[in-house]
Image: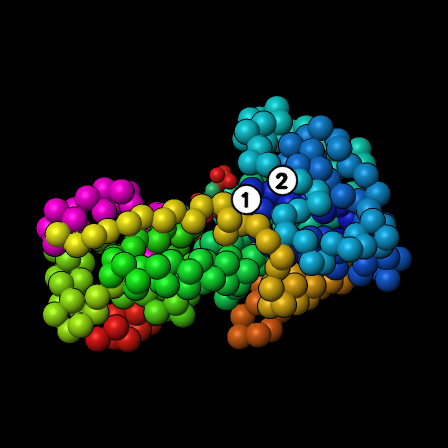
Amino acid sequence: MANAKRVGILTSGGDAPGMNAAIRACARMAAYLGIQCFGIKRGYDGLIAGEIFPLGPRDVSDTIQRGGTILRTARSADFLTPEGFERACEMVKNFKLDCVIVIGGNGSLTGAIELTRAGVPLLGLPGTIDNDLPFTDFTIGFDTAVNTALSAIGNVRDTSASHERTTIIEVMGRECGDIALYSGITGGAEIILVPEEPVDIADICGRLLDGRNKGKMSSIIIKAEGVDIDANALDAEITKKTGLDVKVVVLGYVQRGGAPTAFDRLLASRLGSKAIELCRDGVYGKALGVRKGEIVWDDLEAAMAMPKKSAEELIALSKTLVV
Ligand code: F6P
């Protein structure tokens, strides 16, 4: 494949803190290597609409510390239609882009597979707070989301302890319990519920009452949103079966914003600059990730088909540290 002279960047799906650091790294590394860089607005929607503009090194000044994405993002419905998809492919040719760098999560990179099958040279970067991509140990935005959730857990723990209550805190994570596990274990939660494990109400109630008998007058339950019981329904079940005073806090979108942590900024900077180096070398059709601390890249389709990371160790840990 030809070495890239013109590269487009888009962010797609749910935003994630650190996406700006990745965009910045792409734009700056491209300038460093003499490659022309273009921003594409609103993910695949902007690609279809041809909202594509030059992105120079000064255009990304003062962005490394900002959450969200300066390119904006969307979950594009048009891209899923044959007409929209075709138009997206045409735009890559019209704007003479030698490669498109897609920064996004599961849905966005699944869409990217279709583009590569249609012959579009492309690279995928993992950008999602969920940490649910199989080819990388960590996704851009995950660490920040965990720390945001952790800070909220600390606040809730104070009031929960004062009132001797049980508080259910719902964190994001549709199919992956990593935000719940990382924030729950580090926040000292008594019970962590993740989509990887079925919910057992009797077990939850038993553990809460057992805790009371051992002198634990307040408890924190962290529940990932993807767990197949709603937080309020869980509250009702626990209240009915134990008589405990239960409150619910749904953290929601606060987890998606805020200044990225040093970890996310560094990860995004490494991934973005490596992607541009691959463009320089004419290497396309890859997903980039980090495994055991090293930046790695695999064929996009094979990367997305890798087996899910196991949550077993952390699930077990979450149960042993709460005796
Ligand atoms: O994919 C990241 C994520 O934040 C999930 O945790 C959550 O379920 C979803 O996005 C929410 O998506 P939307 O922004 O479309 O409401």
Instruction: Report, in whole angstroms, how far the alpha carbon at label 1 lies from the one at label 2.
Output: 7 Å
Q: Is residue 313 magenta?
A: no
Depth check, front residue: 21 or 254: 254
Q: Is residue 221 visible?
A: no
Residue placed at 58% from the left, 27% from the top?
Answer: 78
User: Dot 1: within a 10 Å radius of its alpha carbon, few (fewer than 14), some, or many (20 or more) residues?
Assistant: many
Q: Pick the residue in front: 250 or 40.
A: 250
Which of the 4 quarters of the picture holds residue 41? top right
Residue 39 position, x and y percent, is 76, 43
Residue 237 included in the magenta stretch of the image: yes
Rendering quarter of residue 289: bottom right
Query: Which residue is most to the top?
Result: 83
Q: In the image, residue 229 lies at what x, y percent?
A: 26, 45
> Does the CB distance between marks 1 and 2 fall below 8 Å?
yes
Indicate the secondary structure of the residue bearing disc 1. Answer: loop
Q: Amino acid at mark 2?
A: Thr
Q: Is mark 1 within 8 Å of ligand 1?
A: yes
Q: Residue at x 56, y 57 (%)?
A: 141
Q: Amino acid at mark 1?
A: Gly
On the picture, is 212 further left or further right than 99?
Answer: left
